[in-house]
Amino acid sequence: MEKKAWSGRFAGTTHSLVEAFTASIAVDVRLWRQDITCSVAHAQMLGEVGLISMDEAEQLVAALHDIGAAFERGEIELRPDLEDIHMHIEAALIHRLGDIGRKLHTARSRNDQVATTLRLWTREAIDQVNGQIGHLQAAFVTAASREQATLMPGYTHLQRAQPVLAAHSFLAHVERLERDRLRLCDARARVNLLPLGSAALAGTSLPIDRSSVQTKLGFAGLCTNSLDAVSDRDFVVETVFALSLIASHLSGWAEEWILWNTHEFGFIQLPDALCTGSSIMPQKKNPDVLELIRGRTGRVTGDLMSLLMLLKSLPLAYNRDLQEDKPALFDAVDSVLSCLELATLIVDGARLRQDRISAQLEAGFLDATTLMEALISQQVPMRTAHGIVGALVKAAEEGGLHLADLPNAVLQATHPALLTIRDQSLGVKKALEAFRSKGSTAPKLVAAELSRWSDLLTQRGFATTIA
Ligand code: ARG
C-alpha cells in the first residue's frame, strides 16, 4: 500500500474502519470528468504564471486526459485507501509522471477543488434537467393541441366547479414547469462562480491567476471570499430545492392523472407499455409509473432536508461533513431526471377518453357560475345573483334536472332576466364559450397561448406537434 498524500505528520497507519468510514470514492467517482476538467485548467494556469514550466503543464494536461480515457474504459481501480476522486486522480498522475505529477496540487487544496468540481457537475446537471423540462413542456403542448376541443370539468376541492378546456389544464402544467426552469436558471447564476484559488481556506501566497482558471472553466465570475468559497454549499441546497419543487409539481400532476385513470373518473387511457399488472388480480392495469413519480417526491424532499440539516451549525470554513452533500445532490438529480423522462412518455402516450368525459359533462352544474355572471351583466347585484342561482341549483337538484332543463315558469318566477339569458349561458359548452378574461379558459385565448408556447419551445429547440 502506498503512503497517503497527507501522511507526513503521521506515525502509524490509518485504522481500516476509519478508512472505510471516511472514504467517499464509491459516491464521488461520478465527478471524475469534472475533476479532470478542473485540474486541466489549474495545471495550465500554473504553467502560465510560471509556478511550473509550460512543458510540465503540457505533460500534466496530457496525463490528465489519459487518466480520463482510463476512467472511460473502466480501468481505474477504486480504492478506499485513496479516499476520494481527487486522490485517485492525483495518484494516477503521480504514477504516470512521478515528480511532475506531485506538482499539480500546487496552490490548491481539496477544499477549493471539490467545491469547484461540484459546481461544474451541478451546472451540467441543471442544464440537463432544464433540457428534460423542455421535453415535458413540449409533450404537454402537443397534448394540449391534440385536445384543443375537449371540454372537461375543472375542480376545486376536488368537486366539479366550472368547465375548462383540456388544453387549458395541460398548459397549466407547462406554466408550472416554466417557473421550475426559471428557478434553476436563477440558481445556476450562483452555481456559476469559481471557488478555485481559495486554497484550504485563506487563499495562497503563491502568484496564481484565478481569472485565467475562471475563463477556462467558463465561470461567470470568482467567489470573492476564500473562507466563504470553500464552505459554501448554498448552491447545492438551492438546486435541490428547485428539484424538490419540480418533484412536487410532478407529484401533483401524477395524482391528478391517477385519479383520472380510475374507473370512477375514467378520463384518461394510459398506454399498456407504461403500466404494470398485478401478481394476483388478472384484470389489473396499474398506473405504477405515476405512483412512483408521486412517491419519489418524498425522496427528493428528503434530500433537501438532509442538506439543510447538514449545513446547519457548520463553522467556517471546510468541514468534512460537507462530503455528505453529494449523495443528496446526486439522488435528487437522478430522481428528478428520471421522473421528468417518464412523465414525458406518459404525457405523449396518454389519451383523454372524450366519450367518458362528455357523457358526464353536464353533471355538477358547471354552468352555474356563468349563469350568475350573466345575471350580473343584467345589473343584478352579485350577491343577489349568487342567491338566485343557488336557489335554482337547489330546485334543479331536487328535480333531478340540469339548470338548462328547468321549466320557463320556474325561471320567470325566480327572475325575469333569466329567460333572456338562459340561451347564452346554460349548458357546459355555452358556459365555456362565455369566458373572456385574460388568462381564462376562453377558447380563443387558449389557442393563442398554445401557439405562444409552441413558438417559444420551438425557439428553444423543442419540437411540438400542433394540430
Ligand atoms: N472528499 C472530500 C469532500 O467531498 C474532499 C475534500 C476533503 N478535504 C479534506 N481536507 N479532507 O468534501
Image (cartoon, rainbow, N blue to C red):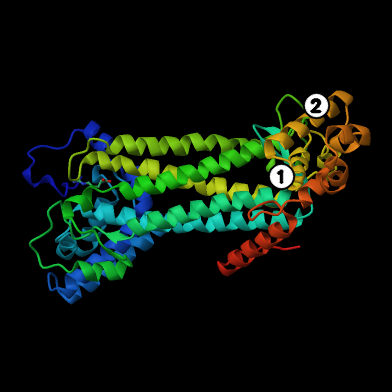
Res. 392 image quadrant: top right
Relative to the observer, which residue lies in front, 145 or 195? 145
Res. 158 image quadrant: top right
In the rendered view of the protein, which quadrant contains the N terminus?
top left
Labels in figure, total = 2
User: What kind of element bears circle 1?
Assistant: helix
Q: Dot 1 corresponds to which residue? A: 273
Identify residue type, mark 1: Ala
Q: Is mark 2 within 8 Å of ligand 1?
A: no
Res. 38 image quadrant: bottom left
Locate residue 124, reporting x and y percent. 42, 58
Crowding around mark 1 (Cα neighbors within 10 Å: few <14, some 14 to 19, many 20+) is: few
Q: Dot 2 corresponds to which residue? A: 394
Locate residue 5, reporting x and y percent. 16, 50
Relative to the observer, which residue lies in front, 71 or 149? 149
366 is higher (above) or lower (below) than 423 = above
Horizontal side of residue 414 vs 261, given as left or right: right
Locate residue 355, reporting x and y percent. 85, 43
Q: CA gap, disc 2 to disc 1?
A: 46 Å
Relative to the observer, which residue lies in front, 288 or 370? 370
Horizontal side of residue 347 vs 333, given as left or right: right
The residue drawn where x is 35% and y is 47% is: 236
Label 2 vs label 1, nearer the camera: 2
Disc number at residue 8?
Answer: none
Identify residue type, mark 2: Lys
Horizontal side of residue 215 vs 458, given as left or right: left
Q: Is residue 62 visible?
A: no
Look at the numbered discs 2 and 1 and tell me whether their residues touch, using CB distance below 8 Å: no
Horizontal side of residue 67 vs 439, given as left or right: left
